[in-house]
Image (cartoon, helix red, strand yellow):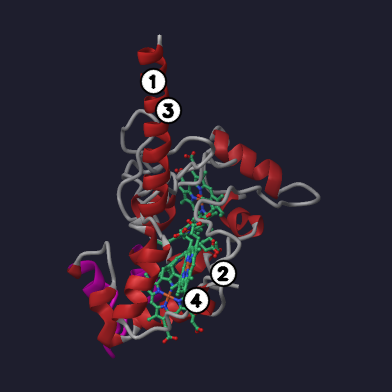
């Protein structure tokens, strides 16, 4: 009996240890509500809006336009929707009005997610859509987008941009050598335009923040990032 009890306690302690260690060094295991990719109230696909690949229907076949040509993603710039990312601390999620400027007419009336969108966006009191946050730092941490985008878009810093191949960086480079803001987001968010449902792919733990700050002469005292 004691042996079995002991094994049970060891197993539970083992599980707790693994949980704490993975939570400390990386992303918490996706249990107890630490979901890295919550289901959204409207299944909004970044692939279609920010990507340029062919659009597939629910069965995986290419969707066709009225004239029979395959539909492809419309490749909107990230800053078309996340308007304040280059100027303030938050990137900003677009209001429902931005969505219905297109979806009043674009997209099938049979589409389930677009029906939800039109119900929320075309009534007498449009919005808001209750999006679930994917990336969220604890309340004691301060993060600001603007200085990061400014730093990463500067011509001499393109080697710090992560999760993006050289050709994509080159394609987003301006004549003066600086890069467009949208090229830099992958550093902390991964390649969002390939995600049908946004997931957090980088740990974004203190170690990762401080590592980059140290390498690039950014401030590392505690009050930089902690209230
Ligand atoms: C047509 C508008 C639109 C475009 C274009 C767009 N997004 Fe989004 N984005 C949204 C909406 C709406 C959400 C909230 C729903 C969700 O999380 O899927 C969102 C969510 C996100 C999130 C997660 C926010 C959180 O809760 O943590 C990130 C990161 C993000 N977008 C990055 C990007 C990047 C990078 C690009 C360019 C490659 C981009 N977005 C292009 C509309 C857009
Ligand atoms: C610039 C125009 C434009 C804007 C702005 C836009 N979309 Fe779209 N959206 C499209 C196009 C084009 C498609 C592909 C239509 C299709 O699949 O038939 C699409 C597809 C979708 C789909 C998939 C529909 C399906 O049946 O699978 C959803 C959901 C969606 N959009 C939601 C949104 C939301 C939410 C916003 C606002 C944050 C938004 N869109 C903003 C143009 C836009
Ligand atoms: C240096 C890392 C880093 C870069 C680069 C970065 N982000 Fe973020 N982003 C974060 C972190 C960290 C959070 C969570 C912030 C919080 O919880 O306070 C976040 C949150 C977000 C959110 C949700 C909350 C908000 O601010 O509206 C969106 C949307 C977003 N980022 C979009 C973008 C886009 C678009 C780009 C590129 C133009 C980008 N981010 C570049 C680290 C980054
Ligand atoms: C890719 C490298 C990189 C990563 C990753 C990164 N930072 Fe930074 N951060 C910088 C640089 C460089 C600056 C200084 C930019 C400037 O003003 O010249 C900076 C500036 C800041 C500032 C503003 C400091 C000030 O007083 O102006 C804060 C706050 C901050 N970072 C927090 C964070 C947090 C929190 C994280 C992790 C979630 C993080 N950073 C991840 C490179 C990075
Ligand atoms: C560049 C940004 C940055 C700097 C500088 C920084 N931190 Fe953090 N810190 C974070 C982030 C982001 C988190 C939340 C994510 C995590 O738990 O790692 C965090 C979390 C913490 C936590 C909570 C850990 C936990 O597991 O809950 C403590 C304690 C902490 N920091 C102390 C410090 C002290 C002390 C300093 C100064 C020596 C410092 N930090 C400097 C970004 C930073």
Q: Secondary structure at mark 2?
A: loop
Where does label 2 land, which residue? 90
Instruction: Find out whether residue 174 is within the magenta segment.
Output: yes
Examine the rendered structure and indicate whether residue 218 appears above or below residue 111: below
Residue reaching furthest to the right: 124
Q: Secondary structure at mark 1?
A: helix
Instruction: Find out whether residue 37 is within the magenta segment.
Output: no
Where does label 3 land, which residue? 12
Q: Nearer the viewer, mark 1 or mark 4?
A: 1
Examine the rendered structure and indicate whether residue 47 appears above or below residue 172: above
Label 2 crowding class (10 Å Cα cut-off): few <14, some 14-19, many 20+?
A: some
Residue reaching furthest to the front: 2
Residue reaching furthest to the bottom: 176
Image point 50% across, 55% down: which residue?
Answer: 135
Mark 2 close to ligand 3, CB under 8 Å: yes
Q: Nearer the viewer, mark 1 or mark 2?
A: 1
Earlier in the chain: of badge 2 and badge 3, it is 3
Where does label 4 land, which residue? 222
Q: CA distance from mark 3 to mark 1?
A: 10 Å
Q: Residues in magenta?
A: 167-186
Earlier in the chain: of badge 3 and badge 1, it is 1
Where does label 1 land, which residue? 6
Q: Nearer the viewer, residue 100 or 127?
A: 127
Q: Quadrant of residue 158?
A: bottom left
Which numbered disc covers residue 104? none
Q: Nearer the viewer, residue 126 or 137?
A: 137
């Amino acid at each position: 009996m004691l042996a079995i009890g002991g094994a049970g306690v060891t197993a539970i302690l083992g599980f707790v240890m693994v949980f704490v260690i993975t939570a400390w060094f990386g992303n918490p295991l996706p249990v107890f509500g630490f979901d890295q990719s919550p289901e959204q109230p409207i299944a909004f696909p970044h692939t279609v809006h920010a990507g340029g690949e062919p659009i597939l229907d629910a069965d995986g076949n290419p969707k066709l336009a009225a004239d029979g040509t395959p539909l492809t993603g419309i490749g909107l710039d990230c800053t078309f929707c996340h308007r304040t990312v280059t100027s303030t601390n938050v990137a900003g999620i677009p209001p429902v009005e931005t969505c219905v400027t297109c979806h009043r007419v674009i997209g099938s009336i049979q589409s389930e997610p677009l029906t939800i969108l039109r119900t929320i966006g075309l009534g007498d009191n449009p919005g808001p859509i209750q999006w679930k946050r994917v990336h969220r730092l604890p309340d004691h941490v301060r993060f600001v987008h603007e200085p990061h985008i400014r730093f990463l878009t500067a011509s001499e810093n393109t080697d710090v941009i992560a999760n993006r191949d050289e050709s994509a960086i080159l394609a987003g480079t301006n004549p003066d050598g600086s890069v467009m803001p949208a090229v830099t987001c992958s550093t902390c968010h991964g390649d969002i335009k390939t995600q049908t449902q946004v997931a957090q792919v980088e740990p974004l733990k203190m170690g990762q923040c401080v590592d980059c700050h140290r390498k690039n002469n950014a401030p590392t005292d505690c009050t930089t990032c902690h209230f």
